[in-house]
Image (cartoon, helix red, strand yellow):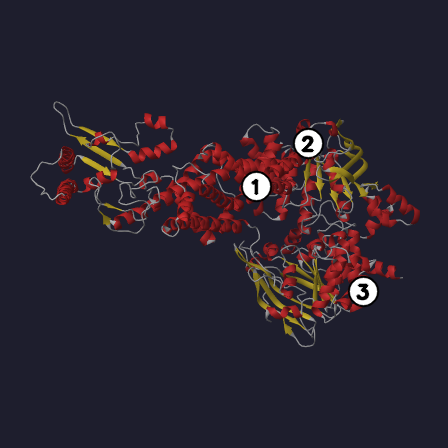
């Protein structure tokens, strides 16, 4: 089983690599051609890319990180507490055909990430299941973990029923023992044949009915009427594992199954990587946290660069009064303390992903790159090819966009990885301080805080978060270093 | 030593006796992404004590790499000496410089062999005072203390002809002019009494008048100190001026044509890197050159005497040699026909000689700004009151030293820079009053070709994009196909192939790039072209080809040129009228007493000092500044130089 799962992990990684480094570029090139672009790299770019590929460690980090990010966009498919597929063939009532109820909750939860709720409703994709539809009782969501255990081996239902009955016997015994002790204190003799109190009888009846229900359910499961397919790692950041024995957080690497006093809780394995204080599984938190941190950093960097590059380009190209005034504005704007503004806003309203991203863009992210672009444009606009273009009569927007910008992008590309590192750090820091994303979203910063508060008893909380963060940042920095080296016109050399 | 092809080259030097420096069959290769590049491939030469040896050659011939190999200055990651011997007899016994451990090189660098470089602007460290830098060189190689070193430094500065040496000692490099910096560099090189001075293009970045002074200085120091000098340059005129013996180096590729066999296959010669093709005394090289490459080098550079309609090129000489003909490179009337030569003449065009552009009182001043609101506190008077009429179909040559405003004047005519005062009339319309938008249609007819072919093409656009852009912009030709066809025509007209259209600029050599620039300029079908030092950055042979191309295009299309250059021989060759520009700052030194005071007081920026047809100007210069300029032209004829020198001494 473990081997099969490992094989599956490898397959998913390979698929992710193929998607990221074969399918996506190919599609982009085709689409670009359709849109009428030539979509051919200039020899200069080809040479830079080749040099980048020659710097092995940077290139491998790039491959790993991009693949990981693309894979993380489909995280719901393989790390989720919801099943990929669940179906139940309800037994036929009289005069009716059997009706099979099918649902794809994991896929639906993935769609819900991209589509507005209403749209996914209309598509008939619902991430929530009703127990009634799947042969269970009640309105609540199906207990997927139990369901999959039962589907795997219907005998488990018999065991569960038996354990309920066992519990009834044990409880009876406990009750009698208690009564005997009580009677002994009164110097009386407790008669075991005396009928039990009504409330006990009612409770046992209920339990017995439950056991009977489980036995009935077993017939359905044995007939193969219930089918469920769980994802590879059946936990997610949205699910609090409250049915686990003991109090969260749970320690990692505990392989024993623990049985409990609670009759409804069947013997359950504790997740391999443990849980945090809210009972969320750690690996799922780390993985979803990677996605949100990276997406956050990328969005901030992208929007920030879009604004910063255009403003810097205009400053450098037009110069004069425009340049002077914007420079002064940047000087004032740049001295606004980012953290205090966020704290003030967070105390008024709960910041969401986009609010936080836009705040970071407005306050910080656009400023740094303007200096680079301004300098770059000042230098490039004095070059003769720009003069030649304006002597031909090319207008300003076209000179900026078509002539200078492609030649001025080197600082953007070399600066980008390092600013991604900075924005990941910013998000983690804000989450750590509690001014970051809303509590239901997965976050490395919160894990770090929980861990830091209990570093003696639960070092794993800090451990996993730090390993994940360090690995990501290390990769990004190595990429940045390789990119800078590949784009450096001078190869390393030294006069002796 | 193996010789490529069928030619036995006459003057490959033999080493006999015990010269100061002898190089035997040196080979230095570079490793690049594209594979091994044979920069120097078989150089044999000897530098005698107290003599000057010149190395002449075009770019890529390996002349600088030879010098760097002697000093072992080639970084190991980039290249190495793969064969040959460099023998140095500085202190009696012979040392093989190519094989000693690199740690021992500082013993020879600076102390016994010194070197000066092309760029005086970047060879001095800008954060240290000049005097400190010289004194440091002295303390490095001798056991002199700082006071002693300072005293020596002042002596050296006096020796290299710097006035007020005590003051200069405490100045930073940016406070000195280019020529002054080169003098400081020479002083540094001389700091430890080197036996050999290697000069790598020491005057290329300088103006002609300064070049003359530096050459005189190097000659004087060489005689006084009995130093050996290895003088590297691309300019035969400079070589004639200063050297005793000359080695001509040639990139192997140039000889491909010569060595290719009858069956059309390339012989091994093409594979060869830069090597020596001729060696001889300076008079022999100039009066009796043997190798066609040398002949071509001599002939393709226009001199004041050149009268032919088109310039011969190196490939003409190689072709002729292959066919067994002998051409005389010193013949001023040498005419060689080539395909693509214009068959019509511009004199027959409509409107020839009518005024096309008229400048009236042009003043282009740049503000010198200061403070956070960047107020103009003073003006840099680049162009100061210029009146000029440029007739249709003619070439107006504009000469002057750097900083005289000639480039600014060219850009002012095209309204790339707006003048502060004055009018530019083009066909009766005043361009200075037009807005950018109104100017746009006129831009098609007024064009410019820049100096540096490496920076004047957008590296991100293919040649086709570059050529089609102006046509699209001005709506020439009906559709994309028509424009592409025109681009093909243009490429072929400027001597390139149609399949070069899909390449990017960096895949071309400097000369080819300049041809692409010319094609781009022609794409919008202009009438008036400013050639802003358009041939200055090119090798002499390519310069000749590009000049020929420009002259052919002028004849074919009746173009009008404003030919801006600092090269007085070229301007004499191409122009119908020569305009000399200068500013008060440059000219002040020509006068003395009250006149000088007046000129300094006036502080006039760049303006025209003399304007005449070339023959008359060169025969009868009136303005003292023109006379000074003309006197500084390297004659390119050793006998004439000797005569002149004798006259000066007498």
Give the x, y percent position of residue A134: 21, 32
Residue reaching furthest left? A193
Q: Which residue is mark 1?
A: A369
Q: Is residue B119 above or below residue B147?
A: above
In this rendering, do the residues under marks 3 and 2 share a single chain? yes
Report the chain holding disc 1: A
Nearer the observer: mark 3 or 2; the answer is: 3
Q: Which residue is mark 2?
A: B445
Q: Residue sitting at 21 percent across and 46 percent down?
A: A259
Residue reaching furthest top? A95
Secondary structure beneath dot 3 equals helix
- In the picture, the quarter occupied by the C terminus of chain B is bottom right
Report the chain holding disc 2: B
Residue reaching furthest bottom? B93
Q: Confirm or deny contact between disc 1 and disc 3 (CB under 8 A).
A: no
Q: Nearer the viewer, residue A435 or B552?
A: A435
- Apparent side of residue B551 relative to residue B26 in the rendered image (left or right): right
Give the x, y percent position of residue A215: 13, 37
């Amino acid at each position: 089983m473990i081997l099969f799962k490992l094989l599956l992990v490898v397959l998913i990684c390979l698929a992710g690599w193929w998607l990221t480094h074969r399918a996506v570029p190919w599609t982009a090139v085709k689409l670009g051609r359709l849109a009428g672009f030539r979509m051919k790299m200039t020899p200069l770019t080809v040479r830079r890319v080749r040099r980048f590929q020659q710097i092995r460690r940077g290139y491998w980090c790039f491959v790993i990180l991009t693949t990981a990010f693309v894979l993380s966009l489909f995280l719901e498919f393989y790390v989720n507490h919801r099943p990929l597929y669940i179906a139940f063939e309800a037994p036929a009532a009289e005069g009716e055909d059997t009706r099979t109820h099918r649902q794809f909750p994991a896929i639906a939860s993935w769609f819900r990430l991209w589509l507005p709720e209403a749209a996914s409703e209309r598509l008939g994709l619902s991430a929530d299941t009703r127990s009634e539809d799947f042969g269970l009782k009640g309105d609540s969501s199906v207990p997927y973990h139990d369901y999959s255990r039962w589907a795997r081996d219907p005998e488990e239902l018999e065991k569960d029923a038996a354990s309920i009955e066992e519990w009834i016997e044990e409880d009876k015994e406990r009750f009698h023992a208690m009564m005997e002790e009580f009677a002994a204190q009164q110097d009386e003799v407790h008669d075991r044949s005396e009928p039990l109190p009504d409330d006990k009888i009612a409770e046992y009846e209920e339990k017995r009915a439950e056991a009977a229900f489980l036995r009935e359910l077993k017939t359905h499961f044995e007939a193969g009427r219930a089918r469920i397919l769980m994802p590879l790692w059946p936990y997610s950041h949205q699910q609090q594992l409250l049915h686990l024995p003991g109090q969260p957080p749970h320690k990692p690497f505990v392989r024993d199954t623990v049985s409990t006093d609670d009759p409804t809780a069947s013997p359950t394995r504790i997740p391999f990587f443990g849980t945090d204080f809210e009972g969320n599984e750690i690996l799922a938190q780390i993985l979803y946290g990677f996605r949100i941190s990276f997406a956050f950093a990328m969005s901030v960097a992208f929007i920030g660069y879009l604004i910063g590059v255009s403003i810097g380009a205009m400053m450098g190209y037009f110069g004069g009064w425009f340049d002077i005034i914007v420079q002064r504005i940047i000087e004032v704007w740049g001295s606004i303390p980012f953290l205090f503004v966020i704290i003030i806003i967070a105390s008024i309203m709960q910041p969401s992903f986009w609010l936080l991203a836009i705040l970071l863009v407005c306050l910080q992210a656009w400023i740094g790159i303007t200096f680079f672009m301004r300098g770059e444009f000042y230098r490039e606009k004095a070059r003769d090819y720009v003069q030649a273009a304006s002597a031909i009569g090319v207008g300003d927007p076209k000179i900026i966009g078509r002539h200078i910008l492609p030649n001025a992008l080197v600082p953007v590309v070399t600066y980008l990885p390092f600013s991604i590192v900075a924005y990941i750090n910013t998000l983690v820091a804000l989450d750590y301080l509690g001014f970051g994303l809303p509590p239901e979203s997965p976050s490395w910063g919160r894990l770090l805080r929980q861990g830091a508060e209990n570093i003696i008893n639960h070092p794993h909380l800090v451990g996993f978060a730090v390993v994940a963060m360090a690995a990501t940042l290390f990769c990004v920095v190595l990429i940045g270093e390789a990119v800078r080296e590949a784009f450096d016109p001078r190869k390393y050399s030294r006069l002796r | 030593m193996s010789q490529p092809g069928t030619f036995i080259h006459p003057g490959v030097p033999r080493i006999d006796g015990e010269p100061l420096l002898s190089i035997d069959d040196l080979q230095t290769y570079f490793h690049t992404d594209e594979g091994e590049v044979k920069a120097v491939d078989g150089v044999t030469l000897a530098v005698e004590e107290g003599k000057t040896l010149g190395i002449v050659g075009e770019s890529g011939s390996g002349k600088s790499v030879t010098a760097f190999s002697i000093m072992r200055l080639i970084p190991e990651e980039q290249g190495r000496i793969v064969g040959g011997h460099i023998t140095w007899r500085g202190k009696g016994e012979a040392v093989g410089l190519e094989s000693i451990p690199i740690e021992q090189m500082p013993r020879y660098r600076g102390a016994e062999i010194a070197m000066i470089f092309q760029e005086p602007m970047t060879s001095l460290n800008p954060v240290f005072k000049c005097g400190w830098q010289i004194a440091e060189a002295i303390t490095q190689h001798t056991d002199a203390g700082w006071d002693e070193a300072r005293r020596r430094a002042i002596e050296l500065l006096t020796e290299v002809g710097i006035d007020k040496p005590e003051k200069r000692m405490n100045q930073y490099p940016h406070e000195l002019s280019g020529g002054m910096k080169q003098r400081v560099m020479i002083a540094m090189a001389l700091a430890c009494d080197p036996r050999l001075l290697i000069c790598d293009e020491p005057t290329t970045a300088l103006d002609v008048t300064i070049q003359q002074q530096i050459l005189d200085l190097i000659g004087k120091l060489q005689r006084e100190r009995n130093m050996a000098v290895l003088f590297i340059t691309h300019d035969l005129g400079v070589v004639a001026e200063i050297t005793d013996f000359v080695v001509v180096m040639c990139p192997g590729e140039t000889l491909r044509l010569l060595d290719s066999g009858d069956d059309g296959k390339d012989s091994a010669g093409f594979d060869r890197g830069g090597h020596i093709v001729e060696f001889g005394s300076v008079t022999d090289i100039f009066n009796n050159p043997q190798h066609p490459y040398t002949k071509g080098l001599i002939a393709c550079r226009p001199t004041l005497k050149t009268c032919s309609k088109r310039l011969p090129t190196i490939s003409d000489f190689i072709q002729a040699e292959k066919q067994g003909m002998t051409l005389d490179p010193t013949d001023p009337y040498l005419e060689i026909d080539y395909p693509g030569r214009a068959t019509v003449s511009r004199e027959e065009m409509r409107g020839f000689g009518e005024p096309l552009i008229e400048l009236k009182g042009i003043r282009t001043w740049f503000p010198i700004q200061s403070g956070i609101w960047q107020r103009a506190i003073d003006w840099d008077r680049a162009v100061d009151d210029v009146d000029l009429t440029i007739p249709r179909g003619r070439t107006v040559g504009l000469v002057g030293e750097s900083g005289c405003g000639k480039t600014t004047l060219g850009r002012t005519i095209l309204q790339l820079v707006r003048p502060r005062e004055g009018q530019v009339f083009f066909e009766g319309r005043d361009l200075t009053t037009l807005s950018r938008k109104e100017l746009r249609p006129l831009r098609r007819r007024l064009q410019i070709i820049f100096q540096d072919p490496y920076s004047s093409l957008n590296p991100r656009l293919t040649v086709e994009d570059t050529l089609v852009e102006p046509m699209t912009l001005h709506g020439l030709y009906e559709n994309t196909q028509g424009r592409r066809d025109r681009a093909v025509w243009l490429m072929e007209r400027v001597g390139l192939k149609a399949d070069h259209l899909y390449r990017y600029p960096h895949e071309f050599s400097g000369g080819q790039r300049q041809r692409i620039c010319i094609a781009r300029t022609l794409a919008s079908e202009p009438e008036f072209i400013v050639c802003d030092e358009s041939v200055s950055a090119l090798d002499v042979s390519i310069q000749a080809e590009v000049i020929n191309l420009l002259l052919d295009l002028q004849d074919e299309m009746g173009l009008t040129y404003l030919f801006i250059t600092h090269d007085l021989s070229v301007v004499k060759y191409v122009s119908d009228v020569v305009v000399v520009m200068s500013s008060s700052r440059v000219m002040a030194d020509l006068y003395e007493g009250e006149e000088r005071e007046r000129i300094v007081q006036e502080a006039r920026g760049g303006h025209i000092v003399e304007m005449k047809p070339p023959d008359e100007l060169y025969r009868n210069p009136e303005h003292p500044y023109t006379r000074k300029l003309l006197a500084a032209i390297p004659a390119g004829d050793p006998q004439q130089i000797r005569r002149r020198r004798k006259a000066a001494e007498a």
